[in-house]
Amino acid sequence: MPSTAPRMRPGPKAASPSKKTVMFAPDIILAAVLNGLMTGSVYALIALGLTLVYGVLHIINFAHGATLTAAMFAVYVAQTMLAIDPYVALVPITLLFFVLGYGVQRFVIGPASHGEDRNILLVTLGLSIVIENAMLSIFRSDTRSIDVPYAFESIDLGFTFLALPRVAAFGVALLVALLLGLLLTTTDTGRAIRAVAKEKTGAALAGIDVAHIYAVTFGLGAACVAIAACLLMPTFYVTPRAGNAFVLVAFTIVVLGGMGSIPGALLGALFIGVVESLCGLFFGESLGQIGIFLIFILVLLVKPTGLFGARA
Amino acid sequence: MIRAYGPALALIGLAALVPFAVSANTVLNFIVFALIIALAAQGWNLLGGLAGQFSFGHAAFFGTGAYAAALLQTRYGVNAWVAFALGIVLAAAIGWVIGFLSFRSGLRGSYFALVTLAFAEVLRILANASAFTGGAAGTLVKLDVRPENFQFVSRAAFVWIAVALVGAVLLMTIAIMRARFGAWLTAVRENEDAARALGVDTLAVKLKAITLSAAITGAAGALYVQYFLYLDAGIAYGPWISIEALIAPIIGGIGTAFGPVLGAVALHVFGEAAKLVAGGVPGIDLVLYGLLLVATIAFAPDGLMGLLMRLGRRKTKEAR
């Protein structure tokens, strides 16, 4: 579970908060908003995985953060030991995590939980403890990062610089969200997923293999965090607890956007990214996260269905 | 009466004799720590086991009890025993507030688990950032070993206090399960809508359960700080205690009176054994905790208590 705020290494010329100045120049605020949007795009990927699983299985996958951590370590190992660039590793690691996610749901979570929602919740919590501490046993609690030649390349916008890896992350994240949307709306598997999400007994009667669809959904959720890990690693570090800080933010996004809603997760993520960036600018690093949690609790208490959610 | 309370009283009596049989400090340390976890788990079990509301953030109550007991002593010079009692009261108050906010909005299942987790995290971040709690450096309770300061030379005294607290909650849990309140809790757990339709004031029942639950877990926190005399935000409000408080009852037998105690002790014996086997590899004991949690849900949903009952029933059958 989280011990530090998920904070990107500041890009070149990222706005740094100074206590004395109360007013910020508009271009600093604009730069903070742009940085927030790029952070938000990676949040979006993580939140998409979470909301997809919630939409279909109606439970929160508490192992999501640990999965992200595992994927980040996979990227780390690929780069340091096999010298594979994170952007090249994206394809095999995503496929690997899809298969892992599929297998875990099909052969562990499904059979172990006896079909009870409460049990699924606890099994995913148990899995997160196992994965997180297995990472701790293997990699110890050192902070690790990878060196890529383009880590500090940037794009000059005239008033600010944008770090190239983060711009790439923004583009890929939006592309993946688009592809996921297409998958759900145009393919047979996508239609089956939506059918199971709406009414699983009806879907089963129509000949859909519900256990298979559950596992596919879980696999897609894991694939989403695997992509997020590949996009994060060039500019972020990994520890055995790194994933959880992101996932707590993702919980907020999913609740804000409405559990199970894909456009909600996307917009919520961009919004939260900007809020975090601006809170960091105005209140300083350590309290930047408080803003997120307050939004989280407020939304849960006032409108648990979120902005786009259909049901509580 | 004897049938209901006899086993509990016998267990308490046996536990109280342990310090006479064992004097090794490591063993007594282990017992006190396991009992503190058992107490926190008993609190969780009242809300999660009896009322079916799974909290993933009992650290909020543990931490509040602990910080209140510590800060009242260090900042305001309140007597340690009074601070202990006030710690329990403040934890109960936090429990009521969190319960009121979340139950009034109708949060259940995943949503309730999430909101409790979020409250614990907010408290952790605040405690870590605020100067009042000593920030990231933490808070030290001054070492002044006198009984009136709730500090004792012998560890046996702490064993007895812990046994007394765990024992009292054990008896209280049995009493609740036999009372009308216990039936209401079961009704809320099994089918909340049906319970409400039959005239059970479910909001009031759940609020009472979370307040009591928070008080018990808060007592565990206050006892923790009194024993170790040190506290920081990660210990007080960290996810570790939320997880321990939840795993112990599930391993031991969720919704039973003895389950949390049995689970906490079994889990820690198991954890120590795992540490011995695995040597210095960090995290390996927790890997096993996680596997044990998944395996329990998969193969023994009623926990150790369920296994014992089954064994007992087979024995009586054979005797006939």
Image (cartoon, rainbow, N blue to C red):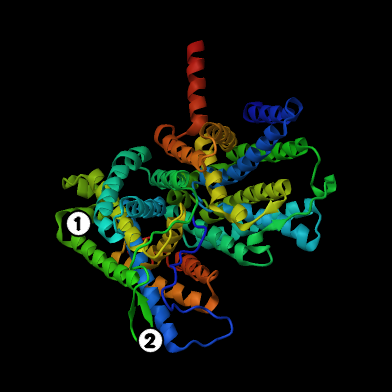
The disc, 2 or 1, on the residue closer to the chain's N-terminal end is 2
Residue A29 versus residue A9: which sits nearer the camera?
Answer: A9
Q: CA distance from mark 2 to mark 1?
A: 43 Å
Q: Would residue A262 be found to the left or right of residue B144 on screen?
A: left
Q: Chain of mark 2?
A: A
Give the residue number, with chain letter if any, for mark 2: A159
Is residue A250 or residue A237 the one in the foreground? A237
Above or below, A303 relative to B201: below
Local crowd at mark 1 within 10 Å, few (<14), some, or many (≥20)? some
Viewer-nearest residue: A303 or B300: B300
Q: Do the residues at pointers 2 and 1 share their chain?
A: yes
Could you say which disc has been placed on residue B235 in the image? Answer: none
Quadrant for residue B294, please give it. Answer: top left
Query: Percent from the top left, x then y, of residue A240?
Result: 46, 51
Secondary structure beneath disc 2? loop
The C terminus of chain A: image quadrant: bottom left
Residue at mark 1: A190
